Amino acid sequence: MERALQLPIIDLSSTDRTLLADSLRKACVENGFFYLINHGIEEELIQRVFEGSRRFFGLSLEEKMKLLRKNHRGYAPFYSEKLNSADNPKGDPKESIYFGAPEDISPFGYLNQWPPQEVLPCWRSTMEEYYRKILCVGKRVVSLMAVALNVDEDFFEKVGAFDPPTALLRPLRYPVAGEIDSSDKYMHGAGAHTDCGMITILVTDGVPGFQVCRDKLQKPQIWEGVHHLKGALIVNIGDLMERWTNCLFKSTLHRVTQPVQERYSVAMFFDPSPDCVVECLQNCCNESSPPSDVPAGFLQFVLQTT
């Protein structure tokens, strides 16, 4: 029987910012995961996001492959990602699509890839609306983390973490076992991993399967199921924030088991700007606990960890 984990609950409607920051710090130190409630994103919008995701993933493979991922934007088919080769030697049996900011323009031109309006009406406007709102939520959370770390609340803004925003929005679909090769039926939907960036904000459709391992160094690992809390988002710490805090905040191992029914989720990965320098906060280190890593730009950090 799966061991259940009750994550801490962070209520963004709280007027006691000091108490809220203290609760957030405790959650980030002890779990690296928490529920976020009263975040301001309407349930109606979330349901439109999921409905659009179901319609997109319900398109023919031929139609989806027209949007095949490039420049970190677009469709990622089954087995195109291998988060943990021990869990899933063939790759993860899930499909997804990546979007950047609605104003996501580079020297290569506009990067986001969308199905034609006549194929999937309104999905682009829905996802762009959700992106802007979840970006605002993420900035509020990161600001609160700064307070919890005893630095200025706009610290991460001032060091260029969101200038420009490089957060990636990723709807995902996990099929039931019968839809993939029968030999793969015991694979995980997503292999055990930690996220690379600052934080990740996840919303799910309520289908079980999400698990965390709070102590990634413990052998054997203990996996606990994260139950769905209606109206709540799930937030977790990434490797970059763990590095910024000298391992005070935990980047927690997590995975998705093979679902017993079709499962959808939408993750927002908050990565800083490419030129943002990640350096251990001074109040997170001392002589007995020196910085575990040297300062590095975000792109350099990614290359070191991949």
Image (cartoon, grey):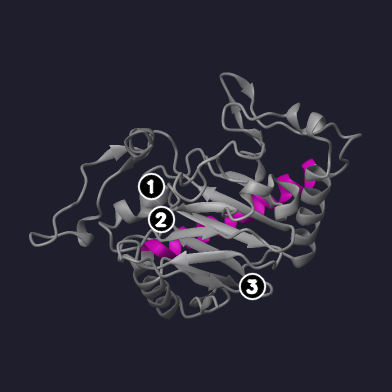
Residue furthest to the front in view is 183
Res 158 label: 1
The secondary element bearing badge 1 is classed as helix
Mark 2 or mark 3: whose residue is earlier in sequence: 2
Q: Residue at x 42, y 34 (%)?
A: 274
Image position of 12 with respect to 76: above or below: below
Residue range of the region highlighted in magenta in the rendering: 124-146
163 relative to 112 in the view: left or right: left
Can you say which quadrant of the picture contains the C terminus? Answer: top left
Q: Quadrant of the N terminus?
A: bottom right
Disc 3 from disc 1: Cα separation? 35 Å
Contact (Cβ within 8 Å) of mark 3 with mark 1: no
Q: Secondary structure at mark 3?
A: loop
- Note whether 92 is above or below 72 in the view shown: below
Mark identifier at residue 228: 3
Disc 3 or 1, which lies upstream in sequence? 1
Task: Give neighbour class at mark 3: few <14, some 14-19, many 20+ (Cα, 10 Å).
Answer: some
- Tell me if residue 93 is in the magenta stretch: no
Label 2 belongs to which residue?
Answer: 154
| Few, some or many residues within 10 Å of mark 2 (<14, 14–19, 20+) | some
| Residue ID at (86%, 40%) | 120
The CA distance from mark 2 to mark 1 is 6 Å
Q: Amino acid at mark 2?
A: Asp
The residue shown at (52%, 63%) is 235
C-beta proximity under 8 Å, tags 2 and 3: no
**Image mark for residue 201:** none
- What's the residue at 83%, 36% (across, down)? 60
Quarter of the image for residue 294 reads top left
C-alpha gap between disc 2 and disc 3: 31 Å
- Amino acid at circle 3: His
Residue type, label 1: Lys
